[in-house]
Image: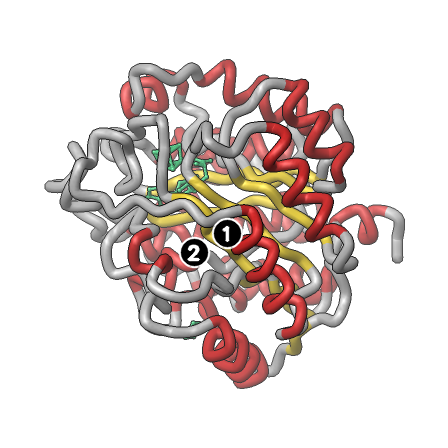
Amino acid sequence: MKTLLEKAQQTHQLTTEEIVQLLAHPRPQPLFDAADAVRQKNVGDGVYLRGLIEFSSYCKNDCFYCGLRRSNLQAQRYRLLPEQIIEMAHKAVAYGYKTLVLQSGEDLWFDTDKMCHIIQEIKKLDVAITLSIGEKTREEYAAYRQAGADRYLLRIETTNQALYEKLDPAMSWHNRVRCLQDLKELGYEVGSGSLVGLPGQTLQDLAADLLFFKEFPVDMAGIGPFIPHPQTPLAHEKADGHFDLSLKMMAIMRLLLPDINIPATTAMETLHPQGRMMALQCGANVVMPNVTEGDYRKKYELYPGKICTGDSAAQCRGCIQHKIESIGRFVSPSKGFHGDYLKGK
Ligand code: SAM
Ligand code: SF4
Ligand code: FES
C-alpha cells in the first residue's frame, strides 16, 4: 500500500486495479493520511460553506433509491414560491454564505422563466449560484447560465450504465452524460459524483466512477453513501459498509484530483455522528449546510434519518463553524471556485 500511495501522491494517477486494491484494503488509515496531506498541500485548510436551499420536493422522475421519487405517494410534497426562495437567499447571505445551492426534484412547475428570475434576483446579492435541479435541455442550461448561474451539480450516480438504467428504467445514462458535457461547454463549474453501495455495484464500478471524474474532469465531486428509504423499491437493502467505502472513495478522489472541491456530504453524517468531520480529514474541503427554513427540511426526505431536520439555518451555521474549527480548520471567506485554483490564485 505504501508504494501505491507514494505513487499516487506524486503522479495523481492510479489504474483500475490499484483503485480496487485501495477500496478493498482492510486498514485504510494510510490512505486517509495521504489524502489529507494532498488536500492540505493543494487546497489548504480553508473549508468552503455552500448554503443549501431545498426548494421543491416534487419530482417527475422515479429513481428507485430516492424518497422523492414520484411513485412514493407517502412523500410530503412542497414547493416554495420564487419570492420565498429569494427571501431565504437573503437570509443565507446575512449568515455569511458566499455560495448558495438551489436544489430540488425535477419539478416542471419551475419553467425556464421562473428559474431565470430566481437566479437573477439572487445574483444581485453577490453570491456564487450552484444549481442542482436535474436533467434539462442544453437551451435551458444556457438560459440559467446567462441569468447568472455559476455551477451545476449533477451526479452521474454510477458509471455502470446497465445498473443506472435498472435503477430508473425511464432514464438514459447517455442523456445524463450529455447533460454534463453541455454544462461544461456552457462554462459552468461542473460537479458530479456517485452513490456508494447501490445494490449490484462492484468495486470495479466505483473505480470506474473515479476514473470518469478524472477524465472529464469535474470541478467538484460529491460522494454519498446510499441510504435505503423505506418507501422505495430498495427499502430492504442494507447500508452496512457504505460509510467506510464512501470515505475511501473521497480519499482516492483527492489523490487523483488534487485541487477539486470535494464536499463532506450530509449523508455521511446521517450514518456517523462525526461523518462530515471525518470526511474533511480524508480529502474533503466543502460542507453544504442546510439553509432551508421551517418544516420543509423534514419533507425533503431523500433518505431516512437526515440530519439537521429540526434545526434552523442559524443553528446549522453556528454548529458547522464550531465543528470545523474543532478539527483545526477554518471557514474560508472566499467563494471557492475551482477555477481560481486552476489559475493559481
Ligand atoms: N433531482 C436532482 C438530481 O437527481 O440530480 C437533484 C436532487 S437529488 C435528491 C440529489 C441527490 O440525492 C442525488 O444525486 C442522489 O445521489 C441523492 N440521493 C437520492 N436518494 C438517496 C439515498 N437514498 N441515499 C443517499 N443519497 C440519495
Ligand atoms: Fe428525482 Fe433527483 Fe430523487 Fe431522482 S434523485 S427521484 S431525479 S429528486
Ligand atoms: Fe445543522 Fe449541525 S450542521 S445542526
Q: Which residue is mark 2?
A: 247
Q: In the depicted view, which residue is nearer to us: 195 or 291?
A: 291
Q: In the depicted view, which residue is nearer to us: 278 or 4?
A: 278
* Left or right: 117, with 289 as reference point: right
Amino acid identity at mark 2: Leu
Amino acid identity at mark 1: Met
* Left or right: 261, with 242 as reference point: right
Q: Which residue is mark 1?
A: 250
Image-quadrant location for residue 147: top right
Is residue 41 something one can see in this rendering?
yes
Give the percent coordinates (x, y) of residue 23: 40, 46
Q: How is the image coloured?
A: secondary structure
Kind of element beneath mark 1: helix
Give the percent coordinates (x, y) of residue 158: 41, 30
Cβ at disc 1 under 8 Å from ligand 1: no
* Left or right: 28, with 163 as reference point: right
Residue furthest left as drawn? 236
Residue at position x 77%, y 32% in the image: 146
- Ligand 1 is found in the corner quadrant, namely top left
Distance Cα–Cα, label 2 vs label 1: 5 Å
Residue at position x 65%, y 61% in the image: 39
Query: Can you say whether 178 is above or below 155 in the image?
Result: above
Kind of element beneath mark 2: helix
Q: Which mark is residue 83?
A: none
Residue at position x 41%, y 48% in the image: 224
CB contact under 8 Å: marks 2 and 1: yes
Q: In the depicted view, which residue is nearer to us: 83 or 68?
A: 83
Is residue 34 something one can see in this rendering?
no
Q: In the depicted view, which residue is nearer to us: 148 or 233?
A: 148
Residue at position x 59%, y 34% in the image: 213
